[in-house]
Image: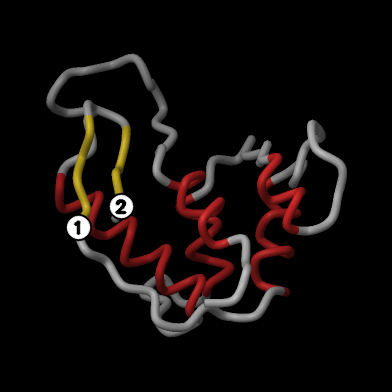
Amino acid sequence: MKLSILPAALALFASVSRTNPTAHSGDSCITQSQADKFVERWIGVVTRQNADLGTQTATLDVILANDFQEHSNSVRSLLGLPPSEISFPSKQAYINGTLASDPYRGVQTVETLVAGCNNILWH
């Protein structure tokens, strides 16, 4: 498998931002069905094979928070950039960068789990 930013992206999206991340009532926690759909949509974006919301841009617009930023030294390292700076300063910058990269091939899900109330573990 070629060196890519996929591992960092997977780690990034393993934690899902909710409107109230400290809430733990049944109505505000991620369900298994929501976790499965999130992973399905994320795979559709990175493989460019499925966009149930119309396009990959529309999908990323739905699954990323409006104030999204990516802070990842591993991504910056893979891109040959110095660490300790913001990798993508905005939602739109991330969407542009993701869709400008080549699609990934052979993405498979072994298991998707809800961890706690606000986290998705994807293996």
Query: Where does residue 70 sit, x and y in percent of width and height?
Result: 66, 41
| Circle number at residue 56 | none
Residue at screen point 31% across, 31% down: 118
Residue 41 sits in which quadrant?
Answer: bottom left
* Residue indicated by mark 1: 111
- Horizontally, residue 21 falls left or right of residue 86, namely left
SS at mark 2?
Answer: strand
The answer to the question of whether label 2 and label 1 lie on touching residues, with beta carbons closer than 8 A, is: yes
Judge whether 75 appears above or below 95 on screen.
Answer: above
Q: How many marks?
A: 2
Query: Where does residue 58 sit, x and y in percent of width and height?
Result: 53, 66
Residue at screen point 33% across, 59% down: 39
Q: Nearer the viewer, residue 1 or 56?
A: 1
* Residue indicated by mark 2: 122
Mark 2 and mark 1 lie on one chain; the one further toward the N terminus is 1
- Horizontally, residue 99 falls left or right of residue 93, namely left
Judge whether 83 appears above or below 103 on screen.
Answer: above
SS at mark 1?
Answer: loop
- Horizontally, residue 27 falls left or right of residue 108, namely left
Indicate the amino acid at tag 2: Trp
Residue at screen point 62% across, 39% down: 68
- Horizontally, residue 14 falls left or right of residue 100, namely left
- Label 1 crowding class (10 Å Cα cut-off): few <14, some 14-19, many 20+? few
Q: Nearer the viewer, residue 1 or 9?
A: 1
Query: Where does residue 107 sit, x and y in percent of width and height?
Result: 38, 74
